[in-house]
Image: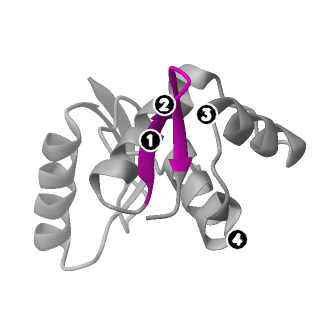
Amino acid sequence: MAKAEINLPNGTKITVDGTPEEIIKIQQSFSKEQGHKTKVNSIDEYNHIPKKKPNKIGPLARIRGIIQENYFKEKRTMDEVRKLLEEKAIFYKSSDIAPSLIRLVKKGELRRLKEDGNWIYVNP
């Protein structure tokens, strides 16, 4: 349940416990009766409003960035990719980088070859 305080234009304060939808309906009903807009001061706890997530760039986008820099002009291993990202102060485990490299291979943005039992990534 969410809790909200509604201030009416005449100075009356109403505290409501309910879902955000119920609180909005109550606010709208008082607004229609009074002919003025009411103000909801706060809806706390479970207001069900999705919070904006911080913009994080994942390993896929980071690897695309180094593709743009022609890093894969030469053959590279997954470990070399991880080390390059670490040099740029971007830290990922190999288990985070591997799926991104495979996605890029499937989309045709990289090519994968097997040399000496290891997968090597290169521009297509």
Earlier along the polypeptide chain: callout 4 or callout 1? Answer: 4
Q: Which residue is mark 4?
A: 69
Residue neighbourhood size for the residue with mark 2, other residues' Cα within 10 Å, grouped as few (<14), some (14–19), many (≥20): some
Q: Nearer the viewer, residue 117 or 87?
A: 117
Q: Nearer the viewer, residue 50 or 120?
A: 120
Q: Which residue is mark 3?
A: 78
Assign the N terminus to one quadrant of the image. top left
- Which residue is at a point 43% across and 64% down the rendered structure image? 124
Where residue 87 sits, quadrant-wise, is: top right
Provide the secondary structure element on which disc 4 rests: loop
Earlier along the polypeptide chain: callout 2 or callout 1? Answer: 2
Residue situated furthest front in the rendering: 116
Residue neighbourhood size for the residue with mark 1, other residues' Cα within 10 Å, grouped as few (<14), some (14–19), many (≥20): some
Provide the secondary structure element on which disc 1 rests: strand
The magenta stretch is: 110-121
- Which residue is at a point 43% across and 44% down the rendered structure image? 112
Q: Report the coloring of the rendering.
A: one colour
Where residue 21 sits, quadrant-wise, is: top left
- Which residue is at a point 16% across and 63% down the rendered structure image? 28
Side of 31 relative to 76 (left or right): left
Q: Amino acid at mark 1?
A: Leu
Query: What x and y, as percent, mark residue 45?
Result: 42, 27
Residue neighbourhood size for the residue with mark 4, other residues' Cα within 10 Å, grouped as few (<14), some (14–19), many (≥20): few
- Asked if labels 3 and 2 touch by Cβ distance under 8 angstroms, the answer is yes
Residue neighbourhood size for the residue with mark 3, other residues' Cα within 10 Å, grouped as few (<14), some (14–19), many (≥20): some
Q: Nearer the viewer, residue 107 or 59?
A: 107
Q: Which residue is mark 1?
A: 113
- Which residue is at a point 36% across and 50% down the rendered structure image? 105
The answer to whether residue 55 is visible is no
Provide the secondary structure element on which disc 2 rests: helix
